Amino acid sequence: MKKSKIKPLLAIAGILLLLFAAVSASTMASEIATAESATATRTLPAVPVSEGEFFSVRIEASDYGIMGQVLETFPAGFKYATSTLDPGSVEVVGNAVKFYLLANASFNYTMIAPGTAGTYYFSGMLIDVDKNESEVGGTKKLKVEPATAIATRTLLAESISPGENFTIGIEASGYGVMGQVEETLPAGFTYVNSTLDPGSVEIADNTVKFTLFGETFFNYTVTASNTVGTYLFSGKLIDMDMREYEVGGDKEIVVESATATRTLPAEPVSPGANISVGIEASGYGMRGQVIETLPAGFAYVKSTLDPSSVEVDAVNNSVKFTLFSENSFNYTVTTSDVEGAYNFSGMLVDVNEKEYEVGRDTELVVEEQEAATAARTLPAEPVSADANFTVRIEASGYGSFGQVVETLPAGFEYMNSTLDSESIEVKNNTVKFTLFGENSFNYTAAASNSTGTYNFTGVLKDMNMNEYEVGGDTEIVVGPTVGTSGVESSIEQEMEAIGVEKDK
């Protein structure tokens, strides 16, 4: 037999009433408040609420003594739901609620708006420890508007793998005290679970009914079809009055086969060189793996992934890269010391352990290459302090792309170059020039404001990140330049030294 919850509540209420009466009969007049000082205010929502909507009311009370009571009378059609007070301190009688206070300064209670739009008025009384009554002030009027029920669907993935589990988000509001979202899944999709109580979910074929009791958001998980293609979701929200509204938001999801491609250097590379291999992968789900088998004589160096996501199998000369939603990454290997044509192979393993061959580039040619070179040309004559001057760089043999890294002398400043600004990176006195087939370029620098002899240094990095010193000119002089005016000035100084006055 179930125990009734009514008796304990009545017992608590009775005890509170006895205490209330006992304290009011006491002679401790100095410790209790007077009727004039006891106050209570009500705060209702400032904006209209929808039919059937849950909303909060705040009560602030003071100076009622060590014990008091707030008696709230709410309009017809409204229903009390809960409060921040202990349930034993609350008594619901018809369309009124008694809140017993023991030194509480404020509390909130939650109501459910009626199913009829209109303007409604609340009233209430604060009863102090001496049973003196004062009206609850503050806001009294509340407007209830017709419900505007709405529901939206969010597909938390743009594309998924066959048979993959994925999550769908549903937002719903304005449906009243109770509502229902009825989702129709695409053919081949299967419901798994949701964030709602299982008792609120009903499954019939490809239709899932979610019963809501005030919830504004929930997620549910489904398993995708095993067949690739584009699929559509549909659904409706049913409010407390059985009116139906279409679920808006996302509707379409793509089930696609997982794919991965490899990009190798297009040109032959040198024996023993470090090269970068690019991998692009998609459709593998929340987690996947790329397993690359390297050619004989090649050795794995590093990748752009976290080292903990990489596992090297030295016996089979393979590397396993674990992916968590990454669409691409690069890895670096050292080529064989022996010239020849070499083949890469690999597999992409999706979240369901299905395997797909890594496509696109498979062959790489290793052969001796012309050594990369770079040379610098500086002004042959001294430059003036703070003057701008031009530096020429010639580079070759670096492959499809390369980089010249120039270190300027102290006090010198980079100004500009003939290359695209996006190909240049300046940090302190180091300037990086990225090349895509260019054989030469110029850059302008400003000289130091101090005279003296200064040295430039630099390296050329080829497409395999091998480094070569930039040759050519390295030294530049900052000082006074010698010209006609300089010669005249020198002659004048010598004439003055021997006492000969210049003709005016």
Image (cartoon, rainbow, N blue to C red):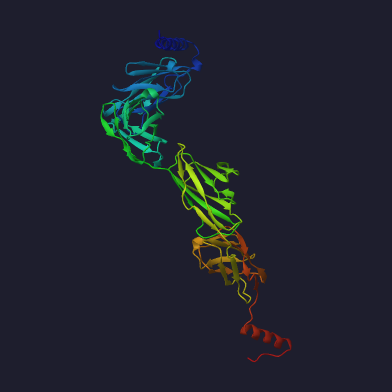
**Which residue is farthest bottom?**
503
Front residue (pair 248, 481): 248
Q: Is residue 504 placed above or below 381 in the rendered structure?
A: below
Front residue (pair 96, 375): 375
In the displayed structure image, the side of residue 239 where residue 352 appears, left or right? right
Q: Is residue 216 visible?
A: no
Which image quadrant for residue 162?
top left
Residue at (36%, 16%) from the top-left corner? 92
**Which residue is farthest top?**
1
Residue 307, horizontal then vertical, whole percent: 58, 44
In the displayed structure image, the side of residue 367 where residue 51 appears, left or right? left
Front residue (pair 186, 245): 186
Residue 4, horizontal then vertical, whole percent: 40, 10
In the displayed structure image, the side of residue 117 where residue 345 appears, left or right? right
Q: Is residue 38 placed above or below 347 in the rendered structure?
A: above
Residue at (53%, 58%) from the top-left corner? 365
Residue 323, horizontal then vertical, whole percent: 50, 42
Q: Quarter of the image containing the C terminus? A: bottom right
Residue 461, horizontal then vertical, whole percent: 58, 61
Q: Quarter of the image containing the N terminus? A: top left
Front residue (pair 455, 55): 455
Numbered disc total: 0
Q: Is residue 282 visible?
A: yes
